[in-house]
Amino acid sequence: MDRDPSALDELILAAQKPSRYVGCELGAVVKDLGAADLKFALAFPDTYEVGMSNLGFRLLYHALNDRPNVACERVFLPWPDMEALLRERRQPLFTLESRARVADFDVLGITLQFELCYTSALALLDLAGIPLLARERTERHPLVLGGGPCAMNPEPAADFFDAFAVGEGEAVVHEIADAVLAWKRSGAPRAELLRALARVPGVYVPSLFAPRFDPATRALAALEPLLPGYERVERRVMPDLDALSTTAYERPLVPFMATVHDRLPIELQRGCTRGCRFCQVGMITRPTRQRSPKQVLRLAETGLAASGYEEVGLLSLSSGDYGCLNPLLDDFLERWEGERIAMSLPSLRTETMSDELAKKIGRIRKTGFTLAPEAATERMRAVINKGNREEDLLRAVESIFQNGWSLLKLYFMIGLPEETDEDVAAIAGLARRCLQVARRTLPKGQGSATIHLGASTFVPKPFTPFQWEPMIAEAETRRRQQLITAELGGRNGAIQFKPHDARQAAIEGALALGDRRVGTAILAAYRAGQRLDGWSEWFDEGRWLEAFRELERVHGVGLAFFAHRRRPLDEVLPWDRIDCGVSKPYLQKQLAAARNQAEVVDCVLAPCTVCGACDYEVVKNRVHEAKDYVPEPPRPPRPPESPVRTHLRVRYSKTGRLVALSHLETMHAILRALRRAGLPMAYSQGFHPKPKVSFGPALPVGVESRCEYLDLELVGAADADAIAARLAPALPPGLTVEEARPLDPRATSISASLRAVHFIADFPADWTEERLGAAIARFEESAQATVRRTSPGKGKDRKRGEKIAQGKAREIDLKDIVTHLALEGERRVAFSLKADPSGSAKPAEVLAAVFGDGAPPRGVKVLKEGVSFERTTSARPQAGIPRAPRYLDA
C-alpha cells in the first residue's frame, strides 16, 4: 500500500496535539532512506514529550546518524486518539523524519525505561504491522531490539523481542549495526542473524535460552543456553564520558512542543556508588564516572548557542556528589547569569545540600526544591544504606528556605524491608519538623512555607540487595498511607500529602521480577486494551488483574507469586544469565547488612567494597576533585546596557509541516531562534524577566500563512535588514523571515490595529466550479449564517480528575464577519474576514458554514495571504499578488 502524504497530513492535523507527529525540528537528521545501507528506527514506547526528554534516546539517535551509511529515524507511541485514527484509516505507524513505514526499516530499537511500558511496546509493534511474537517474524520484518534499564531482566518481554542490548548503548549499538549489515549482505536466514548477535558482547538473544521450571515449587529451575559458549551476557559500560560523541550538542534536537524536561541536558556523571539498597540504577550503572568540568562548560556553550534553550539541566543520579560542583557553578554563573540562562540540578541528596550551594542555585532560579530522604528514622536509613541523618535533612531545609524558596517537596518510600508502623508514622513527624525549620528561617515577606509530601510504594528490582524481598500488597499500602494521613491530621494545610497510586506498584513489581511466563499477562493486558500504563488516566487495574488471572490459568502462577513472595537465596533468578557487574554474593552480603542495619560507605570516599563492577584499569571510578579545578579565565566586565532601543515589526511566513504547530509552540520556536541568532533582546523587569517580544493573533492550526507578525524590542541601535539577515538562518524550516521594518514604539499593537484578514482556500478535485459557486450563492442569499462558539472555562472530570472545558456559549453571525467571498480560479475560493478588537471568525467556521455540513470539508488547504491594518484599505488584494504589509505612521 502506497502512503498518501496528504492523507497523513490530514490525520496529523486531526490529532489532539499535532506537534507530537510533525517532526522537522531543528537538529533532526533527514537522510535518503533509499541510499542508506542500514535503516534504523529508534522507538520510545511513550508519547513524544516523554521520549524526547530522555537523554540516552537523543545520544543514540545522533550516534547512529553520525555514520554516513546508517539512517536513523525516530518513532513514538501515538496518543490514543491518533492510534484510533491510524487504525480507522488503515495507516501504519510512521517515523518522524521521512514519515516512512516503521515496518520497512532493518532494525526497530525500542528503549524500555520502566516495566509498565511493555504493553506500549506491543502497541508500537502492532501499529507498525510487525508480528508481536518474535517467533512469527520472518526475514522481511525488522529486527526488534530492546534496550534500557529493563533489559537487565529481559525475560518478561522475551517472547516479543529478537534481542536485547544490555548496559550502556553508545558502543554496542554500532556493533549491532555492523552485525545486521553483514547479515544483509550475506543473504543468510534470520536465525543466523540471531547467532551473530549472540557473539556481540552485551547482546542477549532470548530464543537462545530455554527456561525450565520446577514442577513442585513452580519456580524457575534453570535457564539453559542453547548455543555452546553462550552462557552469560555481560553488560556494556562506557568507561570515560569525555570520550563520548558531542554531536548531540553541536546539532541538538530542539522540540517544538514543550517536553517533560524542556532544557539542554548535560550529564555531569554516570553511575553512583552510594549503595542505596533499594536502587537498581545505582547498582547497574557502577562505577562513578564524572565528566570533566571543562567539557561540561564546553558542552553548555556549544549546546546553548546551537539550540536557543533557556535552561541547562546538569544531570546525575546525585549531582551533589560531583566533586567540582561548586567551582563549576561559579564559572557557570559568571558566563550565563547575565544572559538569563537557568540551571537545574534535578538530583541532590540532603547531605550534599549546603548553604553555599543553595545560594548559587537561588541566584539562577527559585522554583520548588525537591529532596528525597526516602526513610524517616535513623534505623530505616541504616537498613537501606541511605547515608544521611536527620540533621543533614534539617540543615538542608534551613539552607533552602533561608535562600528564598517557599516550597519544598519531600519524597519517602513505604513498604521497605524491615519497616514497622512506627517508621511509617515517623514520616509525618519528620515532615512537621521540616516545616518548623522552614517557618523559622524563611525571610519575612517571602510568603508562607509549604511542604509537598510524597510516599511511594517500594518495588523490589533485579540486581539490588532487596531483589529477594517481597513487596507489600495494595491493601497494606493503603493502610500505611492512612497512618501518615492520620499522623498529619489530614492532607491539607502547610503539609500537603499526596500518596502514591497503589494500584500500579504491584503490577510493576510483578513485571520487574517476573520470568518468561509473565509475557502471557503482558500480552493479555495489551489485547484487553492496555497501553500508556505510566499515565494514570490510561492505567486500568482491572484489566491487569484479569491478565494475571489468565497467567495463573495457563501457568499456575499469578501476581502474588511474582510480586509478594520472598525468594530463597539459592533460587534461580530470571536475570541470572545477565552480568550487571555487581556480583550476586555481594548483593547477598548487602542484604544481610540491611537486616543488621550495617551501613557501607561510598567507595569513592572509602576503600573498595569489591562489588565486582570495576576492572580497576579501564572500568573504574573517575572523579574530579575541587582542589584540581582550574577556573575559567575571567571575562571582561560586561559593559553597561545601552539605553538605546530598537523597535522592529517582523513579517514571517509559516508553511509546510509547521502548520501543525499551535500559536504557543510557534512563539517558543521563534524565541529560541532569536536566542540562536544572538540578538540583544530587551527584557522585562521583575522576578521572571521575559523578552520584550509580542506576537500577532493566533494562526489556526492547519493554516499556512505568509503574513504573520511579531514586534521586537532590541537593546542598542540596529538595522532592520541586518536583523532579518541574522534571524533568517536561525529559524527552523517552515518559518521564514519575509521582512523587518522599523516600528515607532508608540505604534498600536498588532492585534489592536488589525482590521481584516484575507485567505485563499484550495479545494480537492471533487469540488467543481459549479458546486463551489452554488455554495457561495447560498451564503450570499442567506439572511444570516450563525456559528455557535463555546468559550473555554474551568471544570473537572471527577472520574479522572482532569480539567475539562466548560464555558459560556455565544453566537456570531458570519454575515457580519465575512467581507469578501468569491471564486478565484479553478477550485480556489478567496474570502476576507473582519478582524478588530471585538473579534473575528476562524477559517474553519467559514468553511463549515459555507461549504460543509456542520464541519469543514476534508482536504481543503487554507493560506492566510494578507492582512489589513488600521487606516489602510480592507479591500482584498488582486489575485495571486501577495499584499505588502502596511504600517501605521507615527
Image (cartoon, rainbow, N blue to C red):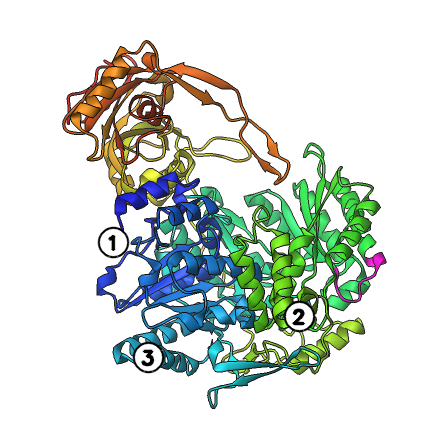
- Which label belongs to residue 2? 1
Residue type indicated by callout 1 = Asp
Q: Count residues near mark 1 (Cα–Cα under 10 Å), then give few for <14, some for 14-19, many for 20+.
A: few
Q: Residue furthest top?
A: 783
Closer to the camera in the image, 767 or 330: 767
Q: Is residue 607 in sight in this rendering?
A: no
Cα–Cα span, label 3 and label 1: 28 Å
The vertical placement of 248 against 194, above or below, is above
Sequence-wise, the earlier of marks 3 and 1 is: 1
Residue type indicated by callout 3 = Pro
Q: Disc 3 vs disc 1: Cβ atoms closer than 8 Å?
A: no
Residue 669, percent across and down? 37, 41
Residue type indicated by callout 2 = Val
Closer to the camera in the image, 839 or 410: 839
Q: Quadrant of residue 251?
A: bottom left
Sequence-wise, the earlier of marks 1 and 2 is: 1
Residue 247, percent across and down? 36, 61
Reading the image, the residue beneath label 2 is 557
Residue 813, percent across and down? 37, 14
Direction from residue 574 to residue 838 in the image, left or right: left
Q: Can you say which quadrant of the picture contains the C terminus?
A: top left
Reading the image, the residue beneath label 3 is 189
Direction from residue 92 to residue 501 in the image, left or right: right
Closer to the camera in the image, 714 or 608: 608
